[in-house]
């Protein structure tokens, strides 16, 4: 089960191309200036079976997937199960937004398990003083677009460069 706020289909703001965005409830970071403060409480979502979320994702064969929130890394077990289903049963790539840094996620077993299924991680808290509306797919300059498979292979952060 995942505490889910909403699913937005065919969005183009949460990564390249058309995407199905899954918005998680729960975020301990409470960043000042957050675009979705309603998502901070885990109780703001409704418990939803992973299979039901997957059915929505699978129904749109052309949209890739973005996990956002809230913070999906606050519910790593449910999102890891969902990500595994996506990777094993579709051709979709997965982006994930988190207020945690990549380095911190590596130190937490359940969060690292979710990383194993993610293609691109947008990491770091939103920092209002570093807000930059010209950045692609992130809100503040401290946040990074990380190529997760390459980073896990090399043992160091490898940035993802979009071809837009």
Image (cartoon, helix red, strand yellow):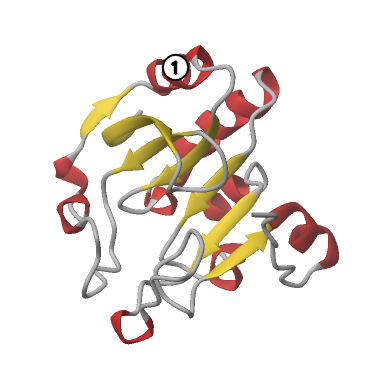
Secondary structure under tag 1 reads helix
Q: Nearer the viewer, residue 93 or 19?
A: 19
Query: Residue 94: x percent and y percent?
Result: 59, 40
Left or right position of 127 against 149: left
Number of other residues with Cα within 10 Å of mark 1, as a class: few under 14, some 14 to 19, many 20 or more: few
Q: Residue at left 45%, top 14%?
A: 55
Q: Nearer the viewer, residue 84 or 93?
A: 93
Query: Residue 123: x percent and y percent?
Result: 51, 66
Asked where in the image residue 50 lies, by quadrant, the reply is: top left
- The count of marks equals 1
Q: Residue at left 42%, top 17%?
A: 56
Residue picked out by circle 1:
51
Q: Nearer the viewer, residue 57 or 73?
A: 57
Query: Residue 100: x percent and y percent?
Result: 46, 67
Left or right position of 132 against 34: right
Quarter holding the N terminus? top left
Left or right position of 107 against 38: right
Quarter holding the C terminus? bottom right
Q: Residue at left 61%, top 47%?
A: 113
Q: Residue at left 76%, top 59%?
A: 152
Q: Residue furthest bottom?
A: 129
Query: Residue 80: x percent and y percent?
Result: 54, 38
Left or right position of 156 against 103: right
Q: Nearer the viewer, residue 22 or 84?
A: 22
């Amino acid at each position: 089960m995942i505490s889910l706020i909403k699913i937005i289909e065919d969005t183009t703001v949460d990564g390249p191309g058309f995407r199905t965005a899954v918005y998680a409830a729960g975020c301990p970071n409470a960043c000042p200036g957050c675009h979705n403060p309603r998502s901070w409480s885990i109780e703001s979502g409704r418990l939803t079976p992973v299979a039901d979320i997957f059915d929505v994702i699978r129904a749109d064969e052309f949209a890739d997937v973005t996990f956002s929130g809230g913070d999906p890394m606050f519910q790593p077990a449910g999102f890891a199960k969902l990500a595994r289903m996506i990777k094993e049963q579709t051709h979709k790539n997965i982006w994930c937004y988190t207020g945690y840094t990549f380095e911190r996620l590596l130190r937490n077993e359940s969060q690292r398990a979710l990383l194993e299924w993610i293609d691109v991680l947008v990491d770091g808290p939103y920092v209002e003083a570093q807000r930059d509306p010209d950045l692609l797919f992130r809100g503040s300059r401290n946040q990074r677009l990380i190529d997760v498979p390459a980073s896990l292979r090399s043992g160091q952060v490898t940035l993802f460069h979009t071809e837009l």
